[in-house]
C-alpha cells in the first residue's frame, strides 16, 4: 500500500471499497480480489483488502476503535495496546488542563490518540509520509483531530524545549527484522537521549528487554504487564522521576493498575515449601522478586532463580501460585515415573534456569491419563530439579 492508494482510500469511493472489503474479510483472498476488481482498480482493491485485514487483526490491540482506524503492517506491530497507552497518558497528564506534548516518532498514532483523549495537545512528527498520513487520519477518525497536528520530519529536529513533555517511541525494526539493540533504534539511542536531556519531562517507550546500562541516570523505568504478559517498558524522566543520579524501578499490572516499586528488600533463602509462586514478568524484569517474596512471606530456593516458595497460601496479583506435590532431582526416567504414578496425561511445563528443551521433553514423557499437573523445571541450590505441582485455588 503506497501513499497514493491510501489517500484514495480516504475518499468517498475509497470508503465504499473499504466497506465492501470488510464484508469479504475471511473469504478466499483470490475470490475477494476478483469481486472488488469488478468495480475498483488494482491499487484501490489491494489497499482496501489490506486495510480490512489489518483492522481485523487490530481488534486485539484497539478493540472497537479498530473498526474506524487505519494501519500499516509495521505500524500495527509496533503500536501500543490501547489500555497501555491510556495508562501512560494518565501518568503524563498534569493535574487540570492537559500538557502540550510533542510525539517525536508517532507511527500510526496509537499513543497520540491516548494523549489527546486525556486532554493533551499533541504535535506529532513521523519520518515516513505514508505513516504520518495514517496517523493524521486516525486522529480525525476518532474525533481528536483538533488536538493533534502530524508533520513529516526527522525526530532529531524536534525541539522538546517548547513543550511540557516529550513522548518518543523509536522504531525497533531494521531491514532484517526486529532489533533489541537500542543503538539500532530509529532514531538511534544517542538522538533519543539528546531529546530527553532537553525536555522538561519525557516518556520513552522501549522494549521490555532493554539493558539497564542504557537507562539514563535519574530516570524511572516502568515495566508494564497486560493480563500476565509483559508488553513493554517505559522510561520516565523529569521532576520526581527518581533520586538524582539514581534509578527508580517500577512494575505495573493492567488491567487494575496495580503498581510495585523497588524498596531494596532481599528475599531470604530456604527450602521448597508447600507452595511455589511464579512472579509476574513485569516484576521479574524490574528486579522486584524480593518485593514479591515479601508480599507472600516467601523465600528463594535458589538465589539466581525467580521462583518464590512459601508455606502459606497468599493471594496476590503479582504471582501465580502452585501447590507442591513432589520435588525431585531432574531425570527423565524419574519424572516420567512420578507423573505416570499420578495418572497425569496433561502437563503444563514451565522452566527458569533450565536448559531442558520443553517440547522435546513433552514428547519424551509419553504420558497418558486423566489427571493434570504443572511441572516446574528449575535449579534448587544450583542443582537441576523438577517440582510437580497443582495450580492453587484462591485462599
Image (spheres, rainbow, N blue to C red):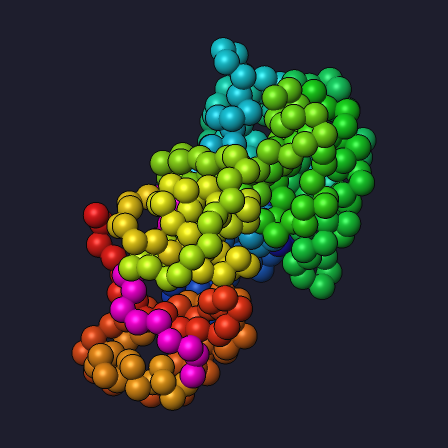
271 or 109, nearer to the observer:
271
What is the residue that sits farthest to the left in this orientation? Answer: 370
313 or 372, nearer to the observer:
313
Q: Is residue 97 magenta?
A: no
179 or 7, nearer to the observer:
179
Q: Does 259 appear above or below 336?
A: above
Residue visible at 68% across and 32% down in the picture: 246
**Left or right side of 189 for 385:** left
The image position of residue 269, as x and y in percent, is 46, 54
Q: Does 359 appear above or below 218?
A: below
Image quarter of residue 43: bottom right
**Left or right side of 303 for 226:** left
Q: Which residues are magenta?
A: 317-331
The image position of residue 325, as x and y in percent, is 27, 69
Q: Is residue 280 visible?
A: no
Q: Is residue 175 visible?
A: yes
Residue visible at 40% across and 34% down in the picture: 257
Residue visible at 69% across and 40% down in the picture: 215
Q: Main secondary structure of the magenta part?
A: strand
Q: Is residue 327 magenta?
A: yes
The image position of residue 208, as x and y in percent, is 58, 49
Residue visible at 72% across and 36% down in the picture: 216
Amino acid at each position: 500500500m503506497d501513499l497514493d492508494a491510501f489517500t484514495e482510500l480516504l475518499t468517498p469511493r475509497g470508503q465504499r471499497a473499504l466497506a465492501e472489503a470488510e464484508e469479504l474479510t475471511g473469504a478466499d483472498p483470490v475470490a475477494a480480489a476478483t469481486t472488488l476488481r469488478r468495480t475498483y482498480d488494482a491499487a484501490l482493491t489491494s489497499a482496501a483488502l489490506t486495510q480490512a485485514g489489518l483492522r481485523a487483526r487490530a481488534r486485539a490491540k484497539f478493540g472497537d476503535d479498530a473498526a474506524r482506524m487505519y494501519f500499516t503492517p509495521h505500524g500495527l506491530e509496533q503500536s501500543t495496546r490501547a489500555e497501555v497507552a491510556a495508562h501512560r497518558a494518565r501518568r503524563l497528564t498534569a493535574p487540570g488542563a492537559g500538557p502540550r506534548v510533542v510525539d517525536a516518532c508517532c507511527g500510526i498514532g496509537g499513543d497520540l490518540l491516548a494523549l489527546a483523549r486525556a486532554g493533551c495537545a499533541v504535535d506529532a512528527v513521523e519520518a515516513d509520509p505514508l505513516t504520518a498520513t495514517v496517523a493524521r487520519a486516525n486522529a480525525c477518525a476518532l474525533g481528536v483531530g483538533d488536538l493533534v497536528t502530524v508533520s513529516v520530519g526527522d525526530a532529531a529536529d524536534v525541539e522538546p524545549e517548547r513543550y511540557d513533555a516529550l513522548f518518543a517511541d523509536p522504531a525497533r525494526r531494521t531491514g532484517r527484522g526486529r532489533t533489541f539493540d537500542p543503538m539500532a533504534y530509529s532514531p538511534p539511542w544517542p538522538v533519543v537521549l539528546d531529546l530527553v536531556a532537553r525536555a522538561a519531562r519525557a516518556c520513552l517507550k522501549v522494549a521490555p528487554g532493554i539493558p539497564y546500562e542504557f537507562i539514563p541516570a535519574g530516570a524511572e523505568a516502568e515495566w508494564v504487564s497486560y493480563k500476565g504478559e509483559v508488553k513493554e517498558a517505559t522510561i520516565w524522566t523529569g521532576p520526581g522521576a527518581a533520586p538524582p543520579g539514581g534509578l527508580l524501578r517500577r512494575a505495573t499490572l493492567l488491567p487494575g493498575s496495580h503498581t510495585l516499586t523497588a524498596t531494596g528488600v532481599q528475599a531470604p533463602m530456604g527450602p521448597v515449601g508447600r507452595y511455589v509462586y511464579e512472579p509476574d514478568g513485569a516484576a521479574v524484569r524490574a528486579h522486584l522478586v524480593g518485593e514479591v517474596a515479601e508480599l507472600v512471606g516467601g523465600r528463594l530456593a535458589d538465589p539466581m532463580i525467580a521462583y518464590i516458595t512459601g508455606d502459606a497460601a497468599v493471594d496476590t496479583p503479582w504471582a501465580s501460585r502452585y501447590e507442591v506435590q513432589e520435588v525431585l532431582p531432574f531425570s527423565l526416567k524419574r519424572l516420567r515415573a512420578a507423573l505416570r504414578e499420578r495418572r497425569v496425561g496433561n502437563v503444563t511445563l514451565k522452566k527458569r534456569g533450565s536448559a531442558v528443551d520443553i517440547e522435546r521433553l513433552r514428547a519424551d514423557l509419553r504420558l497418558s491419563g486423566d489427571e493434570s499437573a504443572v511441572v516446574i523445571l528449575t535449579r534448587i541450590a544450583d542443582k537441576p530439579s523438577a517440582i510437580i505441582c497443582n495450580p492453587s485455588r484462591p485462599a
